[in-house]
C-alpha cells in the first residue's frame, strides 16, 4: 500500500511539474518563447534598456522592459530573431533610463 501511494504521489508531482513556457505580458498581448522580434516590438514597444534596431538587424541580443514601480521589469533574450527567454527582475521605476542619464 505504501508503495502504491509513493508511485501515485510521484506521478502526480511529475504531472504537475510540466515546465511552462516563459512569457511577457504587454497590455493585452502575450509574447512567449519562440515569438519573433517583430511581435515582441509590436506588442511591447521600444525597450527601456537595449537597442530594438539591433535586435531586428542582427537577430540576437538582450533588452529590458520597465513597466513602472508596481510591476517587475523583464529582461528578454533574443537569439536567431526569436524570443529565447524572459527573466523577471526587481520592481521597475518611474523614470525611464534616458531621463536618468540626461540629469
Image: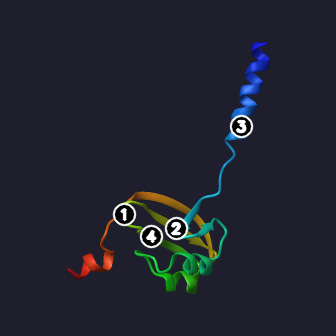
Q: Which residue is mark 1?
A: 92
Q: Quadrant of the C terminus?
A: bottom left
Q: Which residue is mark 3?
A: 14
Relative height, residue 56 to residue 24 (above, below): below
- Give the CA distance from mark 3 to mark 1: 34 Å
Say which label, 1 or 4, has the lower sequence index.
4
- Give the CA distance from mark 1 to mark 4: 10 Å
- Give the CA distance from mark 3 to mark 4: 33 Å
> In this orientation, which residue lies closer to the viewer: 58 or 74?
74
Say which label, 3 or 1, has the lower sequence index.
3
Categorize mark 1 by other alpha carbons within 10 Å: few (<14), some (14-19), many (20+): some
Based on the displayed image, in which of its 4 quarters is residue 94 positioned? bottom left
Point out residue 68 in the picture as x, y percentages from the top left corner: 37, 66
Q: Which residue is mark 4?
A: 64
Categorize mark 4 by other alpha carbons within 10 Å: few (<14), some (14-19), many (20+): many
Q: Which SS class for mark 2?
A: strand
Q: Which SS class for mark 3?
A: helix
Relative height, residue 39 to residue 22 (above, below): below
Amino acid at each position: 500500500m505504501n508503495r502504491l501511494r509513493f508511485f501515485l504521489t510521484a506521478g502526480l508531482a511529475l504531472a504537475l511539474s510540466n515546465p511552462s513556457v516563459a512569457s511577457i505580458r504587454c497590455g493585452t498581448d502575450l509574447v512567449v518563447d519562440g515569438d519573433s522580434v517583430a511581435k515582441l516590438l509590436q506588442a511591447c514597444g521600444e525597450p527601456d534598456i537595449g537597442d530594438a534596431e539591433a535586435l531586428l538587424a542582427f537577430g540576437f541580443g538582450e533588452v529590458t522592459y520597465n513597466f513602472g514601480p508596481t510591476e517587475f521589469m523583464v529582461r528578454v533574450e533574443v537569439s536567431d530573431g526569436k524570443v529565447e527567454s524572459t527573466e523577471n527582475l526587481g520592481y521597475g521605476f518611474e523614470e525611464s533610463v534616458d531621463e536618468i542619464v540626461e540629469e
